[in-house]
Image: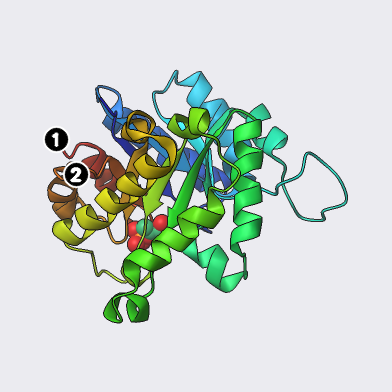
Amino acid sequence: MRTPLIAGNWKMHKDHRQATDLVRELDSLLADLEGVEVAVCPPFTALGEVSRLLEELSSRIVLGAQDVYPAKEGAFTGEISPGMLKALGVRYVIVGHSERREILGEDDDFIAAKVRAVMDEGMVPILCVGETLEEREDGRALSKVEGQLQKDLAPVRAEEISGLVVAYEPVWAIGTGRTATPDDAQEMNAFIRSWLAERYGEENASEVRILYGGSVKPDNAAELMAMPDIDGALVGGASLKATDFAAIARFRD
Ligand code: PEP
């Protein structure tokens, strides 16, 4: 049984004060939620405050980060190590988000190193994969995602795979208001699971949570989550408003 994960990617929104306000509101809206894991991924500058607040509230919400640098320490100006995140109580780390691939030019080798570094620190990577609109229209969506999985998961061994989350995020659906249909998202998530099964074995693959991300909102969450291979959502814009994010996390209500 895979527990659904609803993770909020706040991107470059919310300073540390706004972040704690949002977490307080979310915590009270979600205090009685059972059977769904909820994570928030604030900017680095808010992680410390949010971590302390979650502890103070004995909250069920878990902490995630939006990125990491794949080295233990060193001369990497501006970067944050896996150990620094772990020390703040971070459990999930988003890796390979399309905005970092596209805007910051991150390639698959770098992303694979991040996946390894996050796992080595005992945290869980949320590996984002997905195709552009052009690739989808040319019929190359599956091959694009397969290529990303092959490279980004190269350093991951079969016995480690259950400690991984994959998020299918079609680039054309991120922040655009355009959502993949539940059938399209299911098709890709099932493809990802079958790829994992072929490489790591059926049993291991059946434990991996595969999320969908791309304009998830309160009014489309339930139909997406009803699909057999969609085990939760990575939510951008709608995670910035407590009532919307809580409604998504309560997709079963
Ligand atoms: C994201 O950036 O991971 C995302 C899914 O954004 P949005 O929900 O705004 O499309």
Q: Nearer the viewer, residue 246 or 24?
A: 246
First reached walking from the N terminus: tag 1 or tag 2: 2
* Image location of residue 227, percent across then percent down: 16, 45
At mark 2, the secondary structure is: helix
Horizontal side of residue 5 vs 110, given as left or right? left
Q: Nearer the viewer, residue 241 or 36?
A: 36
Q: Badges 1 and 2: C-beta atoms under 8 Å apart?
A: yes
At a point 82% along the width and 41% down the height, the residue shown is 73
Between label 1 and label 2, give the one nearer the viewer. Answer: 2
Quarter of image, res 102: bottom right
Q: Say few, some or many: other residues with alpha carbon within 10 Å of mark 1 (under 14 / 14 to 19 / 20 or more).
A: few
Q: CA distance from mark 1 to mark 2?
A: 9 Å
* Image location of residue 151, percent across then percent down: 55, 56
Q: Which residue is mark 2?
A: 225
Q: Which residue is mark 1?
A: 252
Q: Amino acid at mark 2?
A: Met
At a point 33% along the width and 69% down the height, the residue shown is 141
